[in-house]
Image (tube, rainbow, N blue to C red):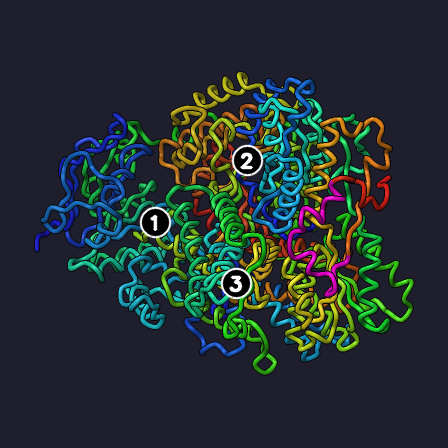
């Protein structure tokens, strides 16, 4: 027994000459929670993939409980007691919780090729019990909420313990990006519970959370480890500075660029809008250049409201006027025609067209600026695409790259570009536009929202955090149980505090 | 459209994939063949090449067709070339185009895969200076005289008249009374329509017979079995006879009758004279009373003879009447009495009169 | 499938604040027999449609609910069911097998030509039967290997192997359908045990085996997982290729058994013995509620789908509907069914959000 359960020495990984990991050393001690932070491309994901056996390192070594190990497959890494909770959820929704936990490593759950369901479920129950989760092993994953799935992921990661002869190492890759409020608390409780018998690597973009749970924090930048700090000797601002190399201030949200919108023309007016069983009696106006933030917990009705405003769902009460004309918004097509754009939270499901190139995605919504009649003008499209890629700092090998190969932040930028290319755009609905993005990418997105406003576009924002809502919005609607509880004016110099908003939310 | 066996329909499906690849090759072959298409009409008329165009020798109908052609070849002391296209229209056309490379005047007797293939084939032959007789498939609005003298004639088989006659055979075996069920071919298919029209005419002449039900079984034995099962459940012992638009369906219906314990009690008729149907007619135990034969030996021999006579100049095509150039040939009802004749090839002697006079079995003009 | 298994009681994620309510009552009392069946064949849509069709035809026609028609229905269902069950395993992967008709042709001919027949002097009895079935398995293996290892889309591969199957069958066919002369084997496809046609008993046996495979073996379980999310399964260290190939082998075996059954029923081996079954079988699978995108569905549901198609074809004839109209009615039912399954799938995608 040593006190270092996992150690990485001088690890190096290159992809066709591009250095992703440059001489990384990293140490995880027994029952410790280590935070790992860094911007996109800093090398966090690469390190995790090396640890989980997906990538082979080009140099350096990995030691598990003091012994040198090499992982050729994910299964070998798991057999060494390293359990992963991936950023993209890695559960198969079409099968049960029990099957997911032991997928590929059923052990005693399958004897002589025959499933022993009782045993398998019992084994799964044991894993779920470790984290005190009430989820039934028989449930199909598709029926679980995101937060519940996260718990199953955790149980799955913990199951490596059964196959390894040492205490488990649990790697949590961005576990909080899809969780909100209470769900976060549950996760943190779990981490506290786990550290009694496991050692944990916690990767997150949310610096305050990293600081909250970690004993030590490793800061990665450009493939190198630029700092290691004990929790007691560092704060969020310093972490931020270490990570991006600049100060974190109100500048982060580009607040200085926010301008007053009083007296600007009204773009959209929503009166007494309602949808049975979702929300009712919603009123607001959106002026040119204004950001209206809508906040509320899950189930408050704000998600449905945003979908209604984009025509993805119908409404049955009240009216919506756009530029003085009443609109029905019966379908997204109608919404796009009316000049409304929508960037959904689930990029992978609704936002991007997987398999198409970056360029094709950019011009998907409205190819009119680069078309002559029904025909695309290839050279104009290529030039315009390059222009957007440059402007938005989309990190892509070239405009023809399949968008699926881009990182989340860069996909999000391409989705933004998709709407920005439309000269008809008047109103843009942003549904969690920074979800899952790192600080640097977030800042780019914020800058971008300011730019939209300067162009006179109205933005309806469903933000990830209260801070984000407050900083970006001119007007904030707080929703609860399908109703607008409070409306705040949030012009520069008149910003409400988060606690003011919370009162209306719960 | 020829309904013989399942092979044509099936082979076509099978060849579908091959065709995708063959198109490229086929197109290449076409263009090079086109360069060689120097009219060879000036060639030696005593040295005419005899050619049969059929689906496949593995299908007994076309094998008999080819055998009939060989009998004719024997009568003029020549070998007959057989082009078998395996039900691939693309292949069929390129085989015909390839004939030009032989540099001889040729006489072709061919069964085009589909009606839409016919025009390309006869035009290819015309350009190459050959002579062709087509059978079964041609577009209704296209006739040999529209193309010229190199398309000597088209021979078809009218299902209506013979359909009426064979239906009568069925009714007679039922004693002129009782209900029947009818299994139709693919509904839009021309022979299917003609044969059913024949049945309806026969019904008019036989007031004692009722048509209990008519259903399509799409020429398929398997489908015919289940449709017959259902119809037997519906009509029970009112079914006194089974009429099927081809032998495949009749044989499927027979299995349904066997399963219901009715085989040998309910008479059946079909069309096409497939070997198993002929066996059933010969044995008689299952009351398979009749089928219809177009006489493949005659189709192979007499029609090839007609093309040959045109090629050698023995027949002056321009002097033939329109009736002679597009006609329905006689078909025969096969029953227990004459089945022997259709189970083995005729002798050259027996076929000789038909070879000498290819119009001997003229039944009616198509137009 | 808008309804899910009995154990699930969760609302869509967009509903009430999720974390607060416990997601699932941990295993209520053991599910009742009815609930068990419902879990197996899937509640809602297709099952209801089947019951409605049966009720309608029972009232509208005097013969539908008769012993002779019931036995004719079962015999008509048998072969379709066996093919569809095999296809279910492939469609669950999100793949397709279009070689059904070619495989049936080959296996029927291999079977008949090895059993006592009127073409050659062989008489291998049950060995012939097994050879016929294995012919199907081999085609399935070929399908799977070509699809999985050469990474050719399954519909392309199987279209090609289906053509090979027809080609092989054409060679074996040799101009006329060889007849099955082995009375023992012939008897398996012929006649009833009580009101049960023997073919239906074979189909029921296949159904039971398939249900067990689906529930209790890796190929059955991983099929769902692979169809649901292949990359994740791969990351879990599962040999995805092996289980995909095995699923294709199951499908090929189904077609092989069906070819042998059809040969026993008709008494011949024939190139066209599977004519029309390909499309009908895919329809049966989808109609039952197995989604073409994979991951959702199952063998039990396919039973419902196949039964709907069989009942519809039978009932329309009994009603005396004009054959021209029948084709349209059947087409209409298929469109409605596909829209209906697509509809519930739409809900599913939303539920993931």
The answer as to whether the residues below labels 3 and 2 share one chain is no
Which of pointers 1 and 3 indicates the residue nearer the eye? 3
What is the span of residues highlighted in magenta in the rendered image?
B333-355
Q: CA distance from mark 1 to mark 2?
A: 34 Å
Within 10 Å of disc 3 (Cα), the crowding (few <14, some 14-19, many 20+) is many
User: Which numbered circle lies on residue C234?
Assistant: 1
The answer as to whether the residues below labels 1 and 2 share one chain is no
In terms of sequence position, does the residue under pointer 1 or pointer 3 come before the other?
Answer: 1
Q: Is residue C16 visible?
A: no
Q: Is residue C24 left or right of residue C34?
A: left
In depth, the one of B55 and C333 nearer the eye is B55
| B349 drawn magenta | yes
Q: Is residue A500 left or right of residue B291?
A: left
Q: Chain of mark 2?
A: B
Q: Chain of mark 3?
A: C
Q: Position of residue A354 (x, y in %)?
A: 48, 37
Identify the residue position indicated by label 2 in the image: B20
């Amino acid at each position: 027994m040593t006190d270092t359960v996992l150690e990485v020495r001088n690890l190096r990984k290159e992809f066709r000459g591009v250095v992703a990991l440059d001489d990384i050393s990293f140490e995880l001690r027994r029952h410790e929670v280590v935070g790992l932070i860094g911007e996109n491309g800093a090398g966090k994901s690469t390190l995790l993939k090396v640890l989980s056996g997906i990538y082979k390192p080009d140099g350096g070594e990995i030691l598990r409980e003091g012994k040198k190990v090499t992982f050729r497959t994910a299964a070998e890494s798991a057999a060494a007691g390293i359990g992963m909770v991936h950023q993209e959820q890695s559960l198969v929704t079409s099968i049960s919780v029990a099957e997911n936990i032991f997928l590929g490593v059923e052990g005693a759950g399958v004897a002589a090729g025959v499933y022993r369901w009782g045993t398998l479920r019992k084994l799964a129950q044991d894993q779920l019990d470790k984290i005190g989760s009430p989820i039934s092993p028989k449930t199909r994953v598709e029926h679980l909420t995101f937060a519940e799935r996260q718990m199953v992921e955790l149980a799955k990661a913990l199951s490596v313990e059964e196959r390894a002869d040492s205490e488990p190492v649990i790697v949590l890759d961005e576990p909080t990006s899809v969780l909100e409020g209470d769900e976060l608390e549950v996760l943190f409780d779990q981490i506290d519970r786990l550290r009694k018998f496991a050692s944990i690597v916690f990767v997150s973009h949310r610096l305050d959370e990293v600081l909250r749970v970690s004993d030590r924090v490793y800061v990665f930048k450009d493939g190198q480890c630029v700092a290691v700090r004990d929790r007691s000797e560092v704060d969020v601002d310093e972490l931020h500075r270490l990570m991006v190399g600049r100060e974190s201030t109100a500048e982060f949200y580009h607040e200085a660029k926010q301008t007053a919108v009083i007296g600007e023309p009204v773009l959209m007016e929503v009166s007494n809008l309602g949808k049975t069983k979702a929300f009712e009696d919603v009123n607001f106006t959106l002026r040119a250049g204004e950001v209206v933030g809508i906040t509320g917990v899950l189930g408050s009705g704000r998600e449905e409201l945003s979908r209604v405003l984009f025509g993805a769902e119908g409404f049955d009460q009240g009216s919506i006027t756009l530029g003085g004309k009443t609109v029905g918004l019966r379908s997204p097509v109608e919404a796009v025609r009316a000049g409304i754009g929508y960037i959904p939270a689930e990029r992978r499901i609704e936002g991007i067209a997987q398999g198409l190139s970056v360029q094709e995605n950019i011009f998907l919504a409205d190819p009119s600026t680069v078309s002559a009649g029904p025909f695309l003008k290839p050279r104009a499209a290529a030039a315009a695409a390059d222009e957007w890629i440059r402007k938005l700092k989309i990190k892509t090998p070239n405009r023809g790259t399949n968008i699926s190969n881009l990182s989340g932040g860069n996909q999000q930028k391409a989705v933004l570009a998709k709407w920005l290319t439309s000269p008809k755009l008047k109103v843009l609905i942003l549904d969690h536009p920074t979800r899952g993005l790192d600080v640097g990418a977030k800042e780019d997105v914020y800058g971008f929202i300011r730019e939209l406003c300067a162009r006179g576009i109205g933005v309806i924002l469903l933000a990830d955090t209260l801070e984000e809502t407050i900083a970006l919005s001119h007007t904030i609607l707080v929703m609860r149980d399908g109703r607008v509880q409070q409306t705040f004016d949030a012009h520069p110099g008149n910003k409400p505090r988060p606690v003011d908003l919370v009162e209306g939310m719960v | 459209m020829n309904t013989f066996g399942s092979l044509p329909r099936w082979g076509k499906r099978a060849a579908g994939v091959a065709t995708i690849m063959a198109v490229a090759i086929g197109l290449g072959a076409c263009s090079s063949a086109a360069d060689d298409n120097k009219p060879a009409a000036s060639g030696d008329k005593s040295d005419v090449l005899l050619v049969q165009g059929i689906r496949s020798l593995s299908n007994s109908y076309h094998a008999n067709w080819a055998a009939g052609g060989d009998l004719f070849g024997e009568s003029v002391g020549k070998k007959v070339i057989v082009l078998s296209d395996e039900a691939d229209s693309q292949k069929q056309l390129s085989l015909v185009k390839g004939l030009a490379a032989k540099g001889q005047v040729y006489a072709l007797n061919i069964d085009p895969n589909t009606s839409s293939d016919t025009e390309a084939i006869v035009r290819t032959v015309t350009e190459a200076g050959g002579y062709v007789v087509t059978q079964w498939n041609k577009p209704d609005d296209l006739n040999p005289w529209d193309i010229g003298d190199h398309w000597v004639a088209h021979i078809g088989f009218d299902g209506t008249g013979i359909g009426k006659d064979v239906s009568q055979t069925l009714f007679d075996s039922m004693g002129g009374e009782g209900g029947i069920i009818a299994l139709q071919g693919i509904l839009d298919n021309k022979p299917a329509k003609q044969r059913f029209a024949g049945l309806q005419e026969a019904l008019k002449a036989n007031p004692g017979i009722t048509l209990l039900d008519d259903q399509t079984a799409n020429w398929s034995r398997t489908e015919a079995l289940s449709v017959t099962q259902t119809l037997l459940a519906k009509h029970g012992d009112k079914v006194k006879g089974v009429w099927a638009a081809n032998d495949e369906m009749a044989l499927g219906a027979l299995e349904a009758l066997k399963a219901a314990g009715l085989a040998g009690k309910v008479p059946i008729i079909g069309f096409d004279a497939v070997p198993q149907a002929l066996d059933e007619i010969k044995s008689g135990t299952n009351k398979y009373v009749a089928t219809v034969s177009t006489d493949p030996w005659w189709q192979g021999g007499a029609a090839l003879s007609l093309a040959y006579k045109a090629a050698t100049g023995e027949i002056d095509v321009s002097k033939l009447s329109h009736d002679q150039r597009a006609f329905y040939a006689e078909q025969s009802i096969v029953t227990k009495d004459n089945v022997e004749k259709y189970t083995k090839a005729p002798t050259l002697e027996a076929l000789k009169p038909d070879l000498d006079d290819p119009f001997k079995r003229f039944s009616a003009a198509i137009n | 499938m808008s309804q899910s298994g009995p154990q699930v009681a969760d609302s869509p994620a967009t509903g009430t604040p999720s974390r607060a309510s416990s997601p699932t009552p941990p295993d209520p009392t053991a599910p009742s027999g009815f609930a068990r069946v419902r879990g197996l064949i899937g509640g809602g849509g297709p099952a209801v449609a089947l019951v409605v069709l049966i009720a309608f035809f029972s009232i509208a026609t005097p013969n539908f609910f008769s012993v002779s028609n019931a036995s004719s229905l079962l015999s008509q269902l048998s072969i379709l069911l066996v093919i569809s069950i095999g296809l279910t395993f492939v469609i669950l992967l999100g793949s397709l097998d279009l070689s059904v008709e070619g495989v049936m042709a080959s296996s029927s001919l291999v079977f008949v030509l090895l059993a006592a027949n009127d073409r050659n002097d062989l008489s291998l009895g049950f060995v012939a039967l097994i050879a016929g079935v294995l012919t199907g398995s081999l085609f399935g293996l070929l399908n799977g290997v070509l699809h999985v290892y050469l990474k050719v889309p399954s519909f392309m591969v199987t279209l090609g192997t289906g053509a090979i199957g027809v080609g092989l069958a054409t060679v074996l066919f040799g101009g006329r359908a060889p007849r099955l002369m082995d009375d023992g084997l012939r008897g398996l496809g012929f006649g009833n045990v009580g009101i049960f046609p023997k073919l239906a008993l074979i189909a029921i046996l296949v159904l039971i085996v398939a249900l067990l495979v689906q529930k209790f073996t890796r190929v059955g379980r991983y099929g769902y997982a692979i169809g649901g999310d292949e990359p994740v399964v791969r990351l879990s260290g599962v040999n995805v290729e092996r289980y995909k190939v095995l699923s294709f082998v199951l499908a090929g075996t189904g077609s092989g058994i069906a070819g042998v059954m059809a040969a026993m029923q008709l008494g011949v081996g024939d190139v066209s013995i599977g004519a029309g079954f390909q499309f009908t079988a895919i329809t049966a699978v989808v109609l039952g509620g197995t989604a073409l995108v994979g991951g959702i569905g199952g063998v039990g549901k396919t039973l419902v789908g196949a039964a709907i198609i069989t009942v519809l074809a039978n009932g329309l004839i009994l009603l005396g509907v004009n054959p021209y109209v029948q084709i349209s009615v059947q087409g209409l039912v298929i469109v409605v069914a596909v829209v209906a399954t697509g509809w519930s799938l739409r809900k599913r995608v939303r539920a993931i959000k």
